[in-house]
Image (tube, rainbow, N blue to C red):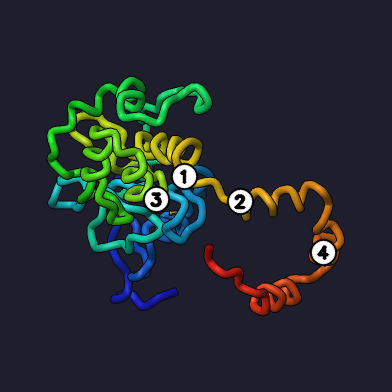
């Protein structure tokens, strides 16, 4: 057990706990006995599953972050959001056009954006969310796909938007449209898929499946890096 002067007072769903300084919100919850069945994934800031909301004992302002990345601070009041109820349009990509009008038809609330920039300030990936929302309005699907490439779909932009917009779902649609209709086709990828389907790599795959973890690691480290095309 850590020394008392390294402990931090926090409150989880209103109940008082003392936890070691330096824990993330996620590990603090687990330290206090909460079992994270939902709202926890990669634990490394990549999957976006652990969106969390908190405030402080004498400061009611709500703050949002990723529970696996944010360290606990004294007098934090914590509660997990295992799911945020955000709008998500249903569409068949094959019947959807890669245009701004199409995105607007699926997400008509987009026009309500008044440029407060709260989404950008909230994004734990530090993406220019408001800017790619305005790219969406201009119908620049490629730019939205590029600017939102590192989105981890945590949903915090939607949780904070005062107009109830869902930037992460809108950007996901744009990335799908870009990948399906606009991205240049990779000849190299087509050839590699054809090779896999024709069994060209079957023997090699069999050998890989028999290797233990150490062998796989060294094989990975020794691999040839393909030149960029
Ligand atoms: S658990 Fe994956 S981002 Fe936090």
Circle nearer the N terminus (3, 4)? 3
Which residue corresponds to mark 3? 149
Alpha carbon of mark 1 to alpha carbon of mark 2: how far? 12 Å
211 displayed left or right of 15: right
Secondary structure of the residue carrying numbered label 1: loop
Residue 22 in sight = yes
| Residue at the image point whose x is 22% and y is 38% from the top | 134
> Residue 187 bears which disc, if any?
2
State how far apart marks 1 and 4 are (Cα).
Answer: 31 Å
Judged from the image, the secondary structure of the residue bearing numbered disc 3 is loop
**The residue at label 2 has a CB less than 8 Å from ligand 1:** no
Query: Looking at the image, is mark 1 or mark 4 earlier in the sequence?
Result: 1
Q: Residue 183, labelled with which disc? A: 1
Question: Mark 2 Cα within 10 Å, few/some/many (few <14, many 20+)?
Answer: few
Crowding around mark 3 (Cα neighbors within 10 Å: few <14, some 14 to 19, many 20+) is: few
Vertical side of 184 occupied by 203: above or below: below
């Amino acid at each position: 057990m850590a020394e008392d002067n390294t402990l931090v007072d926090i409150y989880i769903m209103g109940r008082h706990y003392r936890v070691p300084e330096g824990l993330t919100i996620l590990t603090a919850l687990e330290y206090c006995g909460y079992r994270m069945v939902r709202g926890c994934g990669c634990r490394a800031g990549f999957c976006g599953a652990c969106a969390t909301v908190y405030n402080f004992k004498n400061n009611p302002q709500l703050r949002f972050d990723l529970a696996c990345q944010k360290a606990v601070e004294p007098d934090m009041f914590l509660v997990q959001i295992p799911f945020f109820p955000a709008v998500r349009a249903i569409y068949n990509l094959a019947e959807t056009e890669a245009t701004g009008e199409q995105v607007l038809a699926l997400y008509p609330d987009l026009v309500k954006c008044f440029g407060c920039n709260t989404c950008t300030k909230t994004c734990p990936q530090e993406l220019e969310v408001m800017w790619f929302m305005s790219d969406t309005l201009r119908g620049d699907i490629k730019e939205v796909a590029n600017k939102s490439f590192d989105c981890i779909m945590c949903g915090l932009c939607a949780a904070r938007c005062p107009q109830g917009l869902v930037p992460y779902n809108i950007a996901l649609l744009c990335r799908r449209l870009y990948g399906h209709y606009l991205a240049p086709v990779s000849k190299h990828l087509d050839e590699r898929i054809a090779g896999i389907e024709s069994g060209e790599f079957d023997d090699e795959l069999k050998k890989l499946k028999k290797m233990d973890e150490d062998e796989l690691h060294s094989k990975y480290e020794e691999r040839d890096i393909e030149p960029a095309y």
